[in-house]
Structures are given as structure tokens and as C-alpha cells.
């Protein structure tokens, strides 16, 4: 799903948690995070990305993401992250010390 459609779908469905990447078609992933967080303050955003660049992590968190995981994470880490974020916690991939 591209960034524009992701925002539209999130506004329609109003999910508790959105899983996205910082690289999206038809929209900057950081912009997607900002818009979802601004328009749906009760929705938590988790970034799942291939980028281990600390700047991407920093920009994601500044945009409002509650979590940042690398796509190399295990299914267990992803599930733990979703649970933690849905309970109001933040979560960082262990690569970043989380």
C-alpha cells in the first residue's frame, strides 16, 4: 500500500496500531507518520524498516512513531513490539539498545 492510501485507510478504519515503513510509494514515510499521528492521536505507529540509519530512527520518532524495528527482527520481537505499543510503551529494535 502506498503512503497516500495508507493515510486514507487509517482515517477510515481508525486502527489502534499502524505498521509502516519510512520508504513508501506515493508519499514520504515520515510524512505518513506525521499525518497519521496528527489526525489519529490514539493510533500508535510502528516503523518496520530495512534502514538501520540512526537518522531514520530519529526522524521517525520525531514524526510521532512509537516504535522502530528492523525488518530483520523476529516474529516474537514484532509481536512483543505491537503489544508494548498498544499498551502505551515505546519500543526500539535491540540494535538501538531497546
Image (cartoon, rainbow, N blue to C red):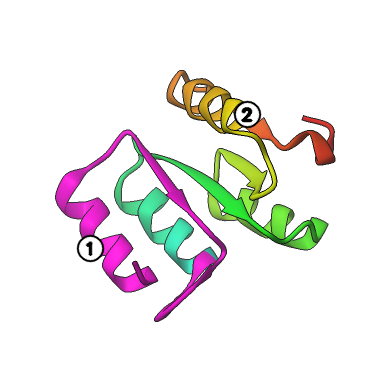
Q: Is residue 44 left or right of residue 11?
A: right
Rendering coords of residue 94 (x, y %):
79, 33
Q: Observer-nearest residue: 58 or 94? A: 94
Residue at mark 1: 8
Q: Is disc 1 surrounded by few (<14), some (14 to 19) or many (20+) residues within 10 Å?
A: few
Compared to residue 91, the image places residue 11 above or below, namely below
Residue sitting at x 73%, y 54%? 58
Left/right placement of residue 43 relative to residue 60 reads: left
Give above or below for 68 relative to 79: below
Tag 2 or tag 1, which sits nearer the N-term?
Answer: 1
When the figure is inspected, residue 44 is found, relative to residue 39, above or below; the finding is: above
Residue depicted at 64% across the width and 34% down the height? 74
Crowding around mark 2 (Cα neighbors within 10 Å: few <14, some 14 to 19, many 20+) is some
How far apart marks 1 and 2 lie (CA) works out to 28 Å
Q: Nearer the viewer, mark 1 or mark 2?
A: 2
Numbered range of the magenta stretch: 1-29
| Residue 41, quarter of the rendered image | top left
Where disc 2 sits, the SS reads helix
Q: Could you tell me which residue is drawn at 83 percent across and 40 percent down?
A: 95
Tell me the residue at 21%/53% (across/down): 11
Query: Which numbered dot is residue 77?
Result: 2
Q: Is residue 22 magenta?
A: yes
Secondary structure state at the residue bearing disc 1: helix
Q: Quadrant of the C terminus?
A: top right
Q: Is residue 35 magenta?
A: no
**Image coordinates for residue 39, horizontal then vertical, percent:** 30, 52
Q: Which mark is residue 21?
A: none
Amino acid at each position: 500500500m502506498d503512503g497516500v492510501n495508507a493515510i486514507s485507510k487509517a482515517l477510515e478504519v481508525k486502527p489502534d496500531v499502524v505498521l509502516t515503513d519510512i520508504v513508501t510509494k506515493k508519499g514520504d514515510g515520515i510524512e505518513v507518520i506525521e499525518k497519521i499521528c496528527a489526525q489519529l492521536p490514539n493510533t500508535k505507529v510502528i516503523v518496520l524498516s530495512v534502514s538501520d540509519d540512526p537518522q531514520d530512527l530519529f526522524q521517525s520518532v520525531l514524526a510521532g512513531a512509537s516504535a522502530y524495528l528492523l525488518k530483520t527482527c523476529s516474529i516474537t520481537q514484532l509481536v512483543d513490539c505491537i503489544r508494548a505499543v498498544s499498551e502505551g510503551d515505546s519500543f526500539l529494535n535491540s540494535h538501538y539498545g531497546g
